[in-house]
Image (cartoon, rainbow, N blue to C red):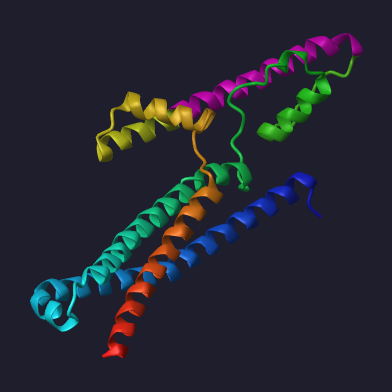
Amino acid sequence: MLTPLQYVRKMQKDRRERTKKNLDSFYDYTDSLITWIIGFCITALSLIVANYAKILEDLNGSPKPIVILLLASTLLGLAYRMLAYSLLMLDRNLDDYLWGLYGDEEMVPIIPDDDVDAWKIDRVVKRLKDDFDIVATYNSDEKMQETERVRLIAHYKDWCEYYRKEYEIAITEVVEVQEVIYKTPQAVSRRQMHREMRKPSMGYNARRWMRLVTWSYWLTVLSFATAISWVSIFLLRQ
């Protein structure tokens, strides 16, 4: 049996995996068709440009409508690909945040809670066990309760400080590597990492982005279908 917190986290984690899978499937299926449409339109436009005089003579009129439709299909298709790729990147940028939020691993505290000094001794003992896996013992004599409480709180703070220093060492290692491989100044990388850890700036309007991607997809298909229909009707009338 799972605790309520574990159950909710597992549910959200599974939901995230389904969302990623559905988004990948949608992109794979639609992108292959849009890529083919773009290639077809560019080829058709190239043929029209190369044989413009002959086409003008055979049509007994201007081929501008078909050119406009093919050009619109190409531009809309490119817009779709850019929007769809941007949507995937925005969605993938959530992975680190959601992994930390719903993942199985949690980092030990590096900063004590604001009300740590007001904790009762039983709570201090529990937090030492839960946060640092430390089994704390204390003198159960009532006269020593306050002294022992203060001692254990100081012990808890010491462990927070120990892991805070370890955290800074880890951050230093990361920013040094980023300076070598990305040429990013350490001060810039350090500020960015602290900001991402404490107050990450991310997220996007999923419904709005999906609406834009879907509209650009169907407008591309509609424009291309109209172009093909126009050519087909012309040929049937010959």
Q: Residue at x 42, y 63 (%)?
A: 219
Q: Is residue 220 left or right of residue 120?
A: left
Q: Nearer the viewer, residue 228 or 122?
A: 228
- Residue in the foreground of this view, choosing between 160 and 135: 160
Which quarter of the rendering shows the N terminus?
A: bottom right
Q: x%, y% of residue 215?
A: 46, 59
Pick whichever, 15 or 180, lies toward us.
15
Report the span colored magenta.
142-168
Which quadrant, please, contains the C terminus?
Answer: bottom left
Q: Nearer the viewer, residue 146 or 139?
A: 146
What secondary structure is the stretch in magenta mostly built from? helix
Q: Position of residue 49 (x, y in %)?
A: 12, 71
Q: Residue at x 72, y 17 (%)?
A: 116
Q: Quadrant of residue 217?
A: bottom left
Residue at left offset 19%, top offset 71%: 45
Task: Specify whether 63 is left or right of 192.
Answer: left
Quarter holding residue 100: top right
Q: Residue furthest right?
A: 142
| 207 over 214 or under it: above or below | above
- Residue 166 picture location, percent across and down: 49, 28
Q: Residue at x 85, y 11 (%)?
A: 144
Q: Position of residue 25 (x, y in %)?
A: 49, 67
Above or below: residue 192 compared with residue 220: above
Confirm whether the magenta stretch covers residue 27.
no
Q: Is residue 48 left or right of residue 106?
A: left
